């Protein structure tokens, strides 16, 4: 099995020559971190046995969130924290997709653009919940930024997982959503389009393309329990966009990797020249300090006590 870091080390010179004008400081930092990951450097961890005198030294991991062989512990910690927030109710997943015409602007100014996506999408969900006769109370949701499709092309979109219900602070009651329907996806897409374009032009003062599709894509689907949805969201959070286990071949400067085709619902193989493959993966390195996971409403950090009260309330109701 080929490793991404081995491919990077072998073709780094050609990659830098071809993409010299597109490599950002964040990509340079990611490359430096991955090439020094678990190498024989002065940075080591020392382990002593308590029953004998044996001493071992292991090279340290780089800890970069784009490194495919790091951050397994970080992913597990995030999953544990999010699962502790889970409510014993059904969940929905809402996905906001950025249209093709705006992706070049997002790639050129990723930090303000991704922040705008989070801000606008969260406001849309809160307003739809406030106007919904099934909810009309305080809701909570967790948003995760993914910048790639299953084929690893540049495809920014936001996933939000939302508990099916709301909390009435006046009556101190949980209002359960009884159906498998939450919001109208077409209405979500219309408001998402209007608000994001207004935010980009008015607040960020960006020059937008003259032509843009009038129909944007927002998906709202029932997913059942929240744990499987969290597993899906965590898959690419802290360990890069392509695990080494997906790289199936590296021969004659050609790299092949497998991916799950969402339409055919089967595994497909994509092959690229090694230098293009490196760019396909490294273009998804995020700006330093950008939070790609954000909690809102009942799931935010300072709502822990209220969330525990709701969990207890629902547990007692379920037992009765």
Image (cartoon, helix red, strand yellow):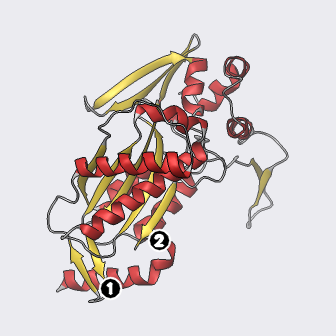
Of labels 1 and 2, earlier in sequence is 1
Mark 2 neighbour density, 10 Å: few (under 14) some (14–19) many (20 or more): some
> What residue sits 21% from the left and 84% below the top?
317
Secondary structure under tag 1 reads: loop
Residue occupying the point 74% across, 37% down: 32
User: Residue 42, percent across and down?
Assistant: 85, 46
Q: Is residue 149 above or below residue 83?
A: above
Residue 168 falls left or right of residue 147: left
The residue furthest bottom is 171
Q: How many marks?
A: 2
Q: How packed is label 1: few (under 14 Cα within 10 Å), some, or many (20 or more)?
A: few
Asked if residue 163 can be seen in this view, the reply is no
Percent position (x, y) of residue 222?
22, 55
In the visual, does 249 lie left or right of 268?
right
Q: Residue 31, labelled with which disc?
A: none
Q: With respect to residue 261, does 134 lie above or below?
A: below
- Between label 1 and label 2, give the one nearer the viewer: 1
Please, what secondary structure does the residue beneath circle 2 have?
Answer: loop
Task: Write down the residue under mark 1.
Answer: 169
Mark 1 and 2 residues: CB-CB less than 8 Å, in contact?
no
Q: Residue furthest left?
A: 179
Residue 73, picture quadrant:
bottom right
- Between the residue at mark 1 and the residue at mark 2, the CA separation in whole angstroms equals 16 Å
The residue nearer to you, when weighing 211 against 163, is: 211
Instruction: Decide: is 221 above or below 81.
Output: above
- Residue at x 42%, y 31% (from the top left corner): 100
Q: The C terminus lies in which quarter of the figure?
A: bottom left
202 to 127, vertically: above or below: above
Tell me if 256 is positioned left or right of 30 in this view: left
Q: Residue extending furthest top?
A: 252
Residue 300's mark? 2
């Amino acid at each position: 099995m080929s490793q991404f870091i081995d491919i990077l080390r072998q073709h780094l010179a050609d990659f830098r020559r071809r993409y010299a004008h597109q490599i950002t400081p964040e990509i340079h930092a990611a490359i430096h971190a991955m090439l020094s990951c678990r190498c024989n450097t002065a940075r080591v961890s020392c382990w002593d046995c308590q029953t004998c005198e044996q001493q071992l030294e292991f090279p340290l991991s780089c800890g970069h969130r784009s490194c495919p062989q790091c951050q397994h512990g970080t992913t597990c910690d995030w999953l544990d924290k999010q699962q502790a927030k889970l409510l014993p109710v059904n969940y929905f997943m809402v996905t906001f997709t950025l249209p093709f015409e705006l992706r070049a602007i997002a790639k050129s100014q990723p930090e303000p653009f991704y922040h705008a996506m989070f801000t606008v999408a969260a406001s849309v969900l809160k307003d739809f919940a406030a106007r919904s006769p099934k909810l009309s109370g305080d809701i909570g949701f967790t948003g995760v930024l993914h910048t790639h499709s299953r084929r690893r092309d540049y495809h920014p979109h936001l996933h939000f997982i939302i508990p099916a219900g709301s909390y009435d602070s006046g009556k101190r009651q949980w209002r359960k959503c009884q159906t498998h329907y939450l919001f109208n996806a077409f209405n979500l897409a219309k408001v998402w389009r209007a608000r994001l374009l207004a935010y980009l032009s008015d607040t960020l003062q960006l020059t937008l393309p003259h032509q843009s599709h009038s129909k944007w894509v927002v998906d709202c689907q029932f997913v059942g329990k929240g744990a499987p949805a969290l597993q899906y969201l965590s898959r690419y959070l802290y360990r890069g966009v392509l695990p080494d286990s997906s790289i199936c071949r590296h021969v004659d400067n050609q790299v092949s990797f497998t991916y799950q085709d969402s339409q055919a619902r089967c595994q497909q193989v994509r092959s690229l020249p090694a230098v293009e493959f490196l760019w396909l993966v490294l273009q998804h390195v995020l700006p330093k300090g950008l939070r790609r996971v954000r909690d809102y409403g009942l799931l935010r950090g300072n709502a822990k006590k209220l969330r525990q009260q709701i969990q207890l309330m629902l547990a007692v109701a379920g037992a009765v």
